[in-house]
Image: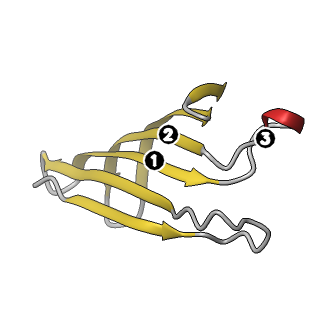
Amino acid sequence: MLPVLASETDGFNSRLDDNSEDLDGYRNNTIHTRLGYLFSENLSVQLVARNNRGEGEFDKCGFGASASNDCQSDFEQTNLRTSVNYTTDTSEHEISYAKTLVERENFNQQASSYFY
């Protein structure tokens, strides 16, 4: 089963010095899954995967004359984890591997201003 969670808001203007009354919205979609298999009473494997994608709008990006209230941040984050578990009556052992991938890009007046 792949649960999909979505969150979205039209936003609000949080800056007291901004009279434009533009609403800075936010959107996030998340997919998460957890799978496992029990080979025997003592040995099991598990995989967990999660992906988040989002967009956020904000004010006051850029410097000097290029400062703007038309700012946006797009991001994507993927988390993966796999593990092997071995359990006995007297002990429990686990070996696992995890990886996280993050991409983020910011826009000032719809032009890319920062990316990693």
In the image, residue 45 lies at what x, y percent?
Answer: 24, 44
**Pointer 3: residues within 10 angstroms few (<14), some, or many (20+)?**
some
**As displayed, is residue 54 above or below residue 16?**
above
Kindly report which numbered mark, 1 or 3, lies closer to the viewer in this rendering: 3
Task: Check disc 1 and report the residue beneath it.
Answer: 55
Q: In the image, what residue occupies the spot 78% across and 37% down? A: 62
**Pointer 1: residues within 10 angstroms few (<14), some, or many (20+)?**
some
Name which quarter of the figure residue 18 lies in: bottom right
Task: Check disc 3 and report the residue beneath it.
Answer: 67
Amino acid tagged 3: Ala
- Secondary structure beneath disc 2? strand
Q: In the image, what residue occupies the spot 56% across and 43% down? A: 72
Quadrant where the N terminus is found in the figure:
bottom left
In the image, residue 84 lies at what x, y percent?
Answer: 32, 42
Task: Check disc 2 and report the residue beneath it.
Answer: 74
- Secondary structure beneath disc 3? loop
Residue that protrudes farthest toward the front in the picture: 20
Discs 2, 3 touching: Cβ within 8 Å: no
Q: Is residue 34 visible?
A: yes
